[in-house]
Amino acid sequence: MIPHIVNAILAGQDIIFLGERGQAKSRIIRSLTSLLDDETPVLAHCELAENPFDPITRLGKDILAEKGDAAEIAWIGRDQRYGEKLATPDITIADLIGEVDPIKGRRRPLPER
C-alpha cells in the first residue's frame, strides 16, 4: 500500500482509500496532511486554487497575461487544501467525485478555429 501512496503523492493525484473497517485508512489520510507545506501560493480572485506559475483556467491565464508579476497572490493553508469524505454505504459516486452534467458542459461555446 505504501508504494501506491507514494506514487499518488508524487503524481499529484487525488487518493481514495478503500477497505474494511479498522485498517487505519482515516489515520493514514489525516497523517498525510502533515507532509504538506504550511501554506502555498495561489492566484487571488480565481475560482480554483490556481498555481501562479502555471494556471490552468482561462481566468488564471488572463490574470497573468494582464498583470504579470504584479498579479495578486493569496496563501492557502494545508487545512484548506485537504478534504475528507467518509464513504458509508449510502454514499454515491456522485457524492465522492461530484456530478458531471454533460448538458451544461455542452452549453459552453465551442472554441473558434
Image (cartoon, rainbow, N blue to C red):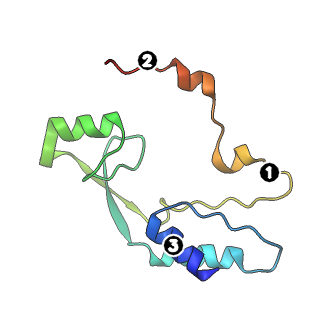
Extreme right residue here? 89
Q: Which of pointers 2 and 1 indicates the residue nearer the eye?
A: 2
Residue at 72% over, 80% down: 24
* Apparent side of residue 87 relative to residue 70 in the rendered image (left or right): right
Residue that numbered label 2 is attached to: 109
Extreme front residue here? 113
Quick one: 53 or 76, which is closer to the camera? 53
Residue at 21% over, 41% down: 64
Residue that numbered label 3 is attached to: 7
Residue at 64% over, 43% down: 98
Q: Earlier in the sequence, mark 2 or mark 3?
A: 3
Amino acid carrying label 3: it is Asn
Q: Earlier in the sequence, mark 2 or mark 1?
A: 1
Circle 2 Cα neighbour tier, 10 Å, few/some/many (<14 / 14–19 / ≥20) = few
Q: Which of pointers 1 and 3 indicates the residue nearer the eye?
A: 3
Q: Position of residue 39 (x, y in %)?
A: 36, 66
Indicate whether 44 appears above or below 23.
Answer: above
Q: Position of residue 76 (x, y in %)?
A: 38, 59
Amino acid carrying label 2: it is Pro
Q: Position of residue 37 (x, y in %)?
A: 38, 72
Calculate the distance from the C-alpha at mark 2 to the C-alpha at mark 3: 37 Å
Amino acid carrying label 1: it is Ile
SS assignment at label 1: loop
Circle 3 Cα neighbour tier, 10 Å, few/some/many (<14 / 14–19 / ≥20) = few
Residue that numbered label 1 is attached to: 91
